Amino acid sequence: MSIQAVATGLDTIWVVLTAAMILLMEGGFALLEAGFVRQKNNVNILMKIFADITIGTLCFYVIGFGLMYGEDLWGLIGTNGIMSMGNWSHLDIPVSLDTYWLFQAAFVIAAISIVSGAVAERINFRAYLLYVILMTAVIYPISGHWIWGGGWLAKLGFSDFAGSTAIHALGGCSALAAAIFIGPRKGKFTPWGTSTIALPSNLPLASVGAFLLWFGWFGFNAGSTLSATDPKIGHIAIVTMLSASAGGAVTFLYTLFRYHRADAPSVINGSLAGLVGITAGCAFVSDAAAILIGGVSGLLMIAGSNWLESKRIDDPVGAFPVHAISGILGTIAVGLFSKNNGLFTQGNWDLLGVQVLGLIVICVWGFVLTWGGLYMIKCWIPVRATEEEEEVGLDISYHGIVAAYQDHDFIAYDDRYNDTQGKDIDR
């Protein structure tokens, strides 16, 4: 066996393994979001994550991958069709097309799951399914082509190693548009403008979700090398760890001294903000820069959460401040701290300018396409759950489950899908 064959085999194992790590992040999203929302909506969260994986995967296979990585047309879209069809010889990748597709499919699923949390507890489940199709087949693939598929931003030199913009800023701004479009949960804001607090149903569950996301992020960032022998893997891993730790530590200290308590939801989201912030530059920035990026991401996450409250925008899990704000910071940080051509390292303004331009375009794209897409969906079916559905909970309204955690005996089979829950019966 040749050395090249061995290298290709190792690269294939590496990419498949890291793709699986990224897919495991969906378990993290599910636990995090379920822990942050009220118990009567836990099952609905899980079903939305399953929709992201199942429907999103198929849409990306049939339509999205071709738009994202197909042969470039005017720098705007790819022109190939279904992933298994057409000529893909233009792709310069060290692994097979199937392996590469799997890794990229894991990314698109992560992008749609960001939006899931922002509309938790009040979106019509059928409308959400239609939005999943729109995001995975159109919104993400087209903007992804501009950045990673050889499109116009890539030709300008835009740099986003693992997706602070392509995934997180896009997903976060889409989440903001969806949260504004649908409106706040019933009772979240009082008539005179003050905010109420919907206590998380299970913070230990949310914490485990955050740890799963943290674990998967090593696949997210280091896996983007697409090579098991890339010497940058170790550095990517350590800056990922440092940035996440800095984000969590800063929110620990801020909430401890500001509110005289270490606030658990803030620390969880602060760590995630640090992970998002380092994603774009994990292959290009120093350890010290990573710590700074993570710390600032944590602080901006808190500021972003406060801004949402002041504007009466309801984002139950903090999708916008964690993903959009930290993604924006991380992308700009590449232009400042990149060891290759950053402003602070090489005195080069060009990359920073391209990074800002790309951010503006992608954020506007995600916001406008999501708003427009939800408006079109609303013309067909309601986008928001009814007041009654929201009041009793989406679990029973859309999935026939009274509570995510049951201690009932058997119920009559015919009662499972009735409007009212079947009563316990003896067997």
Image (tube, rainbow, N blue to C red):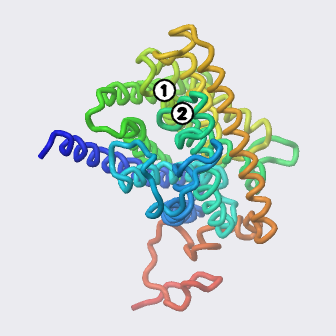
In the image as oriented, which residue stretches furthest toward the top? 347
Q: Can residue 184 be seen in this view?
A: yes
Tell me how far mark 2 sits from mark 1, CA to CA.
Answer: 14 Å
Query: At x 33% / y 47%, what residue is drawn?
Result: 95
Task: Identify whether 289 is placed above or below 32.
Answer: above
Horizontally, residue 47 falls left or right of residue 398, namely: left
Label 1: which residue?
281
| The C terminus lies in quadrant | bottom left
Specify the farthest residue to the right: 192
Residue 265, image x and y in percent? 55, 39
Look at label 2 and name its amino acid.
Ala
The residue furthest left is: 1
Question: In this image, 216 relative to 231: left or right?
Answer: right
| Residue 205 seen by the camera | no
Residue 172 lies left or right of residue 217; in this view the side is right
Q: Which of 283 and 279 is in front in this view?
A: 283
Query: Can you tell which mark lies on residue 82?
Result: none
Q: What residue type is labelled 1?
A: Gly
Q: Residue beneath label 2, please?
A: 273
Q: Earlier in the sequence, mark 2 or mark 1?
A: 2
Q: Nearer the viewer, mark 2 or mark 1?
A: 1
